[in-house]
Amino acid sequence: AIGNSLQELTQLQTIGLNFCGTKVIDKGAVAISNSLQSLKQLQTVHLSFGVTQVSDGGAVAIGNSLQALTQLQEVDLNFTSTSVTDDGAVAICNGLQALTQLQKVRLTFHGTIVTDDGAIAIGNSLQ
């Protein structure tokens, strides 16, 4: 329901969605990411999926949607205490690399399964 409503807000420049501690799974994260892709004017995105059942499927979808949001200047993504692994972190990083207007990034993977490989990918994407 939220995802479908977002698609109507084509002039939206800032969005913040906090699903912390909810029962959201990858299906919900994918729906949100699909809706975000149509919001071409977005400059700021804050998404929090902490302490949910979101895993790599949701993180990959979010990463893919970031690539379409070329006006983004600020990204804040929270995957605290989820099942996201290096694959999800790498997908997020791939999405960030496409954002030439980006000025501020905050990524939180506390309590996930991200290893050194994911941390290296994050570091490389920020160069």
Image (tube, rainbow, N blue to C red):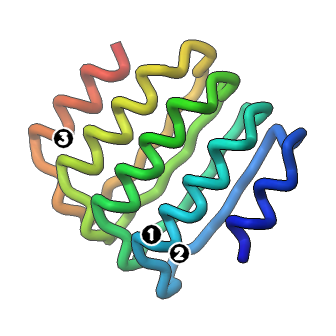
**Residue corresponding to mark 3:** 118
**Are the residues tagged 2 and 1 within 8 Å (C-beta)?**
yes
Image-quadrant location for residue 68:
top right
> Which amino acid does the dot numbered 3 rest on?
Gly
Residue at x 28%, y 59% (from the top left corner):
56
- Direction from residue 64 to residue 48 in the image, left or right: right
Name the spot of residue 113 as percent of width and height, x first: 17, 61
Secondary structure state at the residue bearing disc 1? loop
Q: Examine the rendered structure and indicate whether residue 11 appears above or below residue 55.
A: above
Measured as percent of width and height from the top left, residue 31 is found at: 56, 64
Q: Amino acid at mark 2?
A: Cys
Which residue is identified by label 2?
Answer: 20
Question: Is the residue 111 above or below the residue 92 in the image?
Answer: below
Direction from residue 55 to residue 15 in the image, left or right: right
Check disc 2 and report its element: helix, strand or loop: loop
Q: Which residue is mark 1?
A: 50
